[in-house]
Amino acid sequence: MIAQPAPPGTIQPIPIAARAWSLLALRLGMVLAISLLTWVILRSAAGVSAFPPDTIWATLGLLPVNIVCLLLVAKFYREQGRSLREAMGIQHGRIVKDIGWGLLWLIVLNVPFVLAVSGTVLLMYGAQAPEAFATIFVAPTAQTSISPVWLLIIGLIAVIPFIVLNAPVEELVFRGYGLNGLQPGLGRVGAIIMTSLLFGAQHIFFAATIPGMVVYCIAFTVWGGIAAVIVTKQGRLFPIIIAHWIINFMLSAPALVLPILMLTGVVK
């Protein structure tokens, strides 16, 4: 049967693949734009010329990115007749089991991630790799002199929303709507590879140095690829979100603990 053209004035639904591409492109574009904007502001206001910006500023910049992406992915799922709870695979009576899966995936994801980081640094620096670890993940020139009070305020504004929002939003964008949306055009393997590469590319803007950007890109591509395979096989997103939550909490908590220790005099 030959498909009949739509009546004049009919609004054609946007294919899921096009929406998936737009969602992924929007997130990467916003991360790039906010990283550049933060760099310009820090350069003009504090004389900090190093790029990418310090981690605390990158985390703060993720707040609007996560909010916009959450609203957009919720809209896309709602138009499919699905809630975010359904999209994440949160099921009553499975929370405890999902926490167990999340702890398992935390180990499964972090072992190859650490190996990817170590292997990349070794390939880049050879025998000087041990010394390189002290320089490529910390950039003193990118850090700004901030009082402990303001450091704590910025940390509260940046870190708490990051811990709450980033894991579910990133998983919904990359391993949820993005992965499912790219499969019709790229196939399962192609969708896994593409979303993993984009996940790795996003994280280059959270590194401390240019060499660190290379390491982050490779390591987070590996992390994203394994996470995508797990989600594809398990058929549910929530256990990976739990693993992602734990990682974000572990990496972000020091940004709150350090200024508190400085204010109490424990650290000077």
Image (cartoon, rainbow, N blue to C red):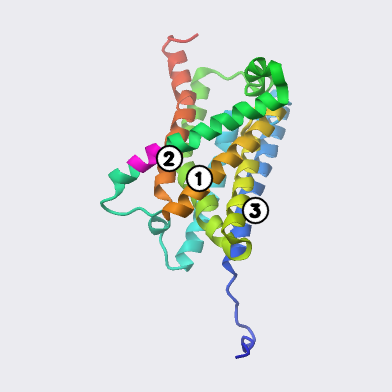
**Identity, as a three-letter code, of the amino acid under mark 3:** Ala
Q: Which mark is residue 105?
A: 2
In this view, the mark in front (1 or 3): 1
In this view, the mark in front (2 or 3): 2
Q: Element under label 2?
A: helix
**Identity, as a three-letter code, of the amino acid under mark 1:** Ala
Q: Which mark is residue 25?
A: 3
Name the residue beneath numbered marker 1.
Answer: 227
Q: Is residue 160 visible?
A: no
Q: Alpha carbon of mark 2 to alpha carbon of mark 1: how far?
A: 8 Å
Q: Are marks 2 and 3 in contact (CB under 8 Å)?
A: no
The segment highlighted magenta reads 100-105
The residue depicted at 63 percent of the width and 28 percent of the height is 119
Q: Are marks 2 and 1 in contact (CB under 8 Å)?
A: yes
Q: Element under label 3?
A: helix
The foreground one among 261 and 22 is 22
Looking at the picture, how far across and down is residue 71, in whole percent? 50, 55
Q: Is residue 74 above or below residue 206?
A: below
Looking at the picture, how far across and down is residue 151, in whole percent? 52, 23
